[in-house]
Image (tube, rainbow, N blue to C red):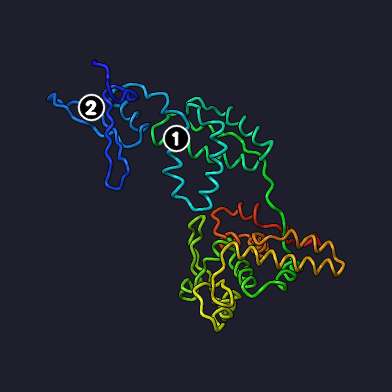
């Protein structure tokens, strides 16, 4: 075969086509210079991604895939480009942070060289600094590997399978009624609404903030959780008669003079975002802790300071039975509700 005079970085019979578009962007794609059964020349499209094109070229040539296309660097690149953007914004940020650490170790490694022992070593080393983050990074690597199998980069079994994670201790804080009352008393109107909605629905803070008047339909608050996409209808009317506490809260919000599209809004009708919610909660908590300390109850003040808005969801789960709590929180597995969200022991009768 005559030596190539152009595109020498490409394998034999692989072509690069470039074109400058009217927008000024450069369009680039790759082709395989093949031949039909009658001998006529044909260019078979290989796509725009060089590494993907090399894998397709290898299939057409019936040769081993070039080694560089099997490096995790290229798989991470594709995962970051194609998979992460489809996730929720918070998950995207978390994944990108995890990838940053995974790349430091695995970027230049061929995918087929990764073994469970290597994953365990990564867990142990990262676990010395950030054991919980190490678990999240290993979980992400597992999904990256599964996608790599789908894309044809490897046929090996996922090496993360069977590798144990670092032990995690779930947060065990329980906001009792004394702490709740202290912070609630110091809260402004919109924060009280947010606390009540969070407690009565058991939803995540982000799901509470997006609740709209339009979600009140046919005697229920309809919602779809951001994280799990789980759909729920939480009743505003008690089946046995009268309004539920959630129904009474909705009536209270609706009865205000200022119209608003959102259930959690300022007296002027502006919706709260996560930053304004956090600021208002921090201010109320600080005021409540200060009042407790000035009253001479430093123990209560310290307990108040540990209270976080995210503890309201576990409070809701802890103050109802397991089956109801699991449904309200949108869990398909009651064990998650029991081990992570229920933070008080089961109520039982004594022996006699």
Q: Answer above or below: position of 291 versus 138.
A: below
The residue shown at (47%, 50%) is 87
Residue 187: where, in percent of width, then height? 69, 72
Q: Answer above or below: position of 296 versus 84.
A: below
Q: Secondary structure at mark 2?
A: strand
* Rendered image quadrant of residue 153: top left
Q: Is residue 333 left or right of residue 17?
A: right
| Tally of numbered tags | 2
Q: Answer above or below: position of 222 versus 230.
A: below
Q: Is residue 240 in view from this perspective?
A: no
Query: Callout 2: few (<14), some (14-19), or many (20+) C-alpha neighbours within 10 Å?
Result: some
Query: Callout 1: few (<14), some (14-19), or many (20+) C-alpha neighbours within 10 Å?
Result: many
Q: Which residue is mark 1?
A: 75
Q: In the depicted view, which residue is nearer to us: 308 or 286? A: 286
Q: Quadrant of the C terminus?
A: bottom right
Structural distance between the alpha carbons of marks 1 and 2 = 26 Å
Residue 12: where, in percent of width, then height? 28, 22
Q: Which mark is residue 33?
A: 2
Foreground mark, 1 or 2, reads 2
Q: Residue furthest right?
A: 296
Q: Which mark is residue 216?
A: none
The residue shown at (55%, 39%) is 100
Q: Secondary structure at mark 1?
A: helix
The residue shown at (80%, 69%) is 291
* Rendered image quadrant of residue 337: bottom right
Residue 95: where, in percent of width, then height? 53, 45
* Rendered image quadrant of residue 130: top right
Q: Is residue 187 in view from this perspective?
A: yes
Q: Is residue 340 left or right of residue 19?
A: right
Contact? badges 1 and 2 (CB < 8 Å): no
């Amino acid at each position: 075969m005559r030596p190539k005079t152009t595109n020498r970085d490409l394998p034999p019979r692989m072509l690069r086509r470039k074109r400058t578009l009217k927008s000024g962007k450069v369009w680039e794609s790759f082709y395989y210079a093949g031949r039909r059964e009658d001998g006529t020349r044909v260019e078979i499209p290989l796509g725009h991604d060089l590494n993907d094109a090399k894998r397709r070229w290898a299939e057409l040539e019936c040769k081993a895939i070039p080694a560089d296309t099997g490096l995790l660097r290229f798989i991470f690149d594709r995962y970051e480009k194609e998979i992460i953007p489809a996730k929720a914004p918070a998950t995207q940020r978390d994944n990108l942070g995890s990838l940053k650490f995974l790349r430091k170790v695995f970027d230049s490694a061929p995918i087929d060289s990764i073994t469970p022992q290597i994953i365990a070593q990564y867990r142990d080393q990262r676990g010395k600094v950030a054991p919980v983050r190490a678990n999240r990074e290993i979980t992400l690597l597992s999904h990256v590997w599964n996608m790599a199998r789908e894309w044809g980069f490897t046929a090996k079994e996922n090496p993360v399978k069977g590798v144990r994670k670092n032990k995690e201790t779930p947060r065990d804080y329980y906001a009792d009624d004394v702490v709740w009352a202290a912070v609630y008393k110091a809260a402004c109107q919109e924060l009280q609404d947010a606390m009540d909605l969070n407690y009565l629905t058991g939803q995540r803070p982000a799901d509470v903030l997006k609740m709209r008047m339009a979600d009140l339909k046919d005697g229920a608050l309809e919602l779809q959780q951001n994280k799990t996409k789980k759909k729920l209808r939480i009743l505003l009317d008690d089946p046995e008669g009268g309004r539920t506490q959630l129904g009474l809260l909705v009536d209270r919000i609706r009865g205000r003079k200022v119209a608003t599209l959102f259930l959690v809004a300022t007296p002027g009708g502006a919706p709260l975002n996560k930053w304004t919610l956090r600021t208002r909660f921090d201010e109320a908590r600080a005021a409540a802790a200060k009042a407790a300390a000035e009253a001479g109850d430093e123990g209560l003040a310290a307990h108040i300071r540990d209270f976080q808005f995210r503890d309201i969801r576990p409070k809701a789960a802890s103050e109802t039975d397991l089956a109801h709590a699991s449904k309200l929180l949108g869990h398909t597995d009651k064990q998650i509700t029991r081990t992570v969200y229920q933070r008080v022991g089961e109520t039982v009768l004594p022996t006699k």
